[in-house]
């Protein structure tokens, strides 16, 4: 699991948007071999979509051969309701880029046979070759999509009754009126998301800090559905400083130091805010542990040769590295 910590929600969004752009461009999607992207709802991806639209307008990316699967949809509100996830994603993303309509997949919360609709969705994911990258938002109780606490870790796309917390949380989109919030939804399952070849989780804000701690520092537990990510072979969590509030200081330092060394080894990446070199400042602190760490970083700065530092496996995890070597 890779944990990337940025200062705030804006930086998290810029980072992920660049990452998605890189992944798609490296993949070189075609009609016959599209890039399949899983998409979250909620507010977490808002700025990410904004940046992706900017990249598209600047000619840095095309979504022509990108196939999307939204992760969830309310049951029983009209497709064109302003809070349906269909309208939401269309308004803030699809209609601003060159997505082909046939490549956009959403669950139909008004299908006459909801069970059949869920089976259709799962079959369609398989038919396009599986999901390459699933972007996921997380609720404060650790749910993702509508996999509420207690969801089976083997669950697949299905009808789900919403937890009271989710109804309350989502009431902000329904003028604060709980009675207007749908009480059930269609959602991809925990297993559906975990079968994606890569999962990228967005966690920002102090209100999600417990969920992040449960996800990273404790065991896999269906009461914190997002903890299932520990079983994923290629998981990336991008969070802001506020979301780390409940993590142990040691955990934060550990992941930050890994990220620092990673950035050093790959040198200049396009994942910095302005494409800047993401090299940590080298200052010698008084703590013996930190001193050792800083000296190690300094040693790397002096001696690093990118070639030879990565195993094949790690190379697979780093599209940027591949690019640099070409
Ligand atoms: N069903 C949605 C999810 O798709 C979303 O990812 C999550 C977090 O929402 P937000 O990003 O607004 O915090 O909760 C909602 O209930």
Image (cartoon, rainbow, N blue to C red):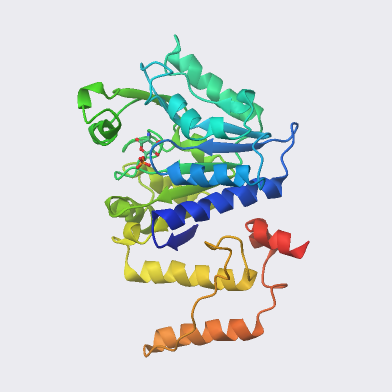
At 63% across and 86% down in the image, what residue appears? 302
Q: Is residue 305 left or right of residue 221?
A: right
Where residue 131 appears, x then y in whole percent? Answer: 59, 37
Question: Looking at the picture, does residue 294 appear above or below residue 74?
Answer: below
Image quarter where ligand 1 lies: top left
* Residue that lies at the very extreme toward the right in this rendered image: 326
Where residue 160 appears, x then y in whole percent? Answer: 36, 25
Quadrant where the C terminus is found in the figure: bottom right
Question: Looking at the picture, does residue 306 appear above or below residue 183?
Answer: below
Viewer-side residue, 227 vs 18: 18
Q: Is residue 140 left or right of residue 306?
A: left
Among the 4 quarters of the image, the one containing residue 144: top left
Among the 4 quarters of the image, the one containing residue 111: top left
At 44% across and 32% down in the image, what residue appears? 155
Question: Looking at the picture, does residue 82 appear above or below residue 273?
Answer: above
Q: Is residue 221 left or right of residue 105?
A: left
Where residue 254 appears, x then y in whole percent? Answer: 43, 70
Viewer-side residue, 139 vs 119: 139
Question: Looking at the picture, does residue 314 appear above or below residue 306?
Answer: above
């Amino acid at each position: 699991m890779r944990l990337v910590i940025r200062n705030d929600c804006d930086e998290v969004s810029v980072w992920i948007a660049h990452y998605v752009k890189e992944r798609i461009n490296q993949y070189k999607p075609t009609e016959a071999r599209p890039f399949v992207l899983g998409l979250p709802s909620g507010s977490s991806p808002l700025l990410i979509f904004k940046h992706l639209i900017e990249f598209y307008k600047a000619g840095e990316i095309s979504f022509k051969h990108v196939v999307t699967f939204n992760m969830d949809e309310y049951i029983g509100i009209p497709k064109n309701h302003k809070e349906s996830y269909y309208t939401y994603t269309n308004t803030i993303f699809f209609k601003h880029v060159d997505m082909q309509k046939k490549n956009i997949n959403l669950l139909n919360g008004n299908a006459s046979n909801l069970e059949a609709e869920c089976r259709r969705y799962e079959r369609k994911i398989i038919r396009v070759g599986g999901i390459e990258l699933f972007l996921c938002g997380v609720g404060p109780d650790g749910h993702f999509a509508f996999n509420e606490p207690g969801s089976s870790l083997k669950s697949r796309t299905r009808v789900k009754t919403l937890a009271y917390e989710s109804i309350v949380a989502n009431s902000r989109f329904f003028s604060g009126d709980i009675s207007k919030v749908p009480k059930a939804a269609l959602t991809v399952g925990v297993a559906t998301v975990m079968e994606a070849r890569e999962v990228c989780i967005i966690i920002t804000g102090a209100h999600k800090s417990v969920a992040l701690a449960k996800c990273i520092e404790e065991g896999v537990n269906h009461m914190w559905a997002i903890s299932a990510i520990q079983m994923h072979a290629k998981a990336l969590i991008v969070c802001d400083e506020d979301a780390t509030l409940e993590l142990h200081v040691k955990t934060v330092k550990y992941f930050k130091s890994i990220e620092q060394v990673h950035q050093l080894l790959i040198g200049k990446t396009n994942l910095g805010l302005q494409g800047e070199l993401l090299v940590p400042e080298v200052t010698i602190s008084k703590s013996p542990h930190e001193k050792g760490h800083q000296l190690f970083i300094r040693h790397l700065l002096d001696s690093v040769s990118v070639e030879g530092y990565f195993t094949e496996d790690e190379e697979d995890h780093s599209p940027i590295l591949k690019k640099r070597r070409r």
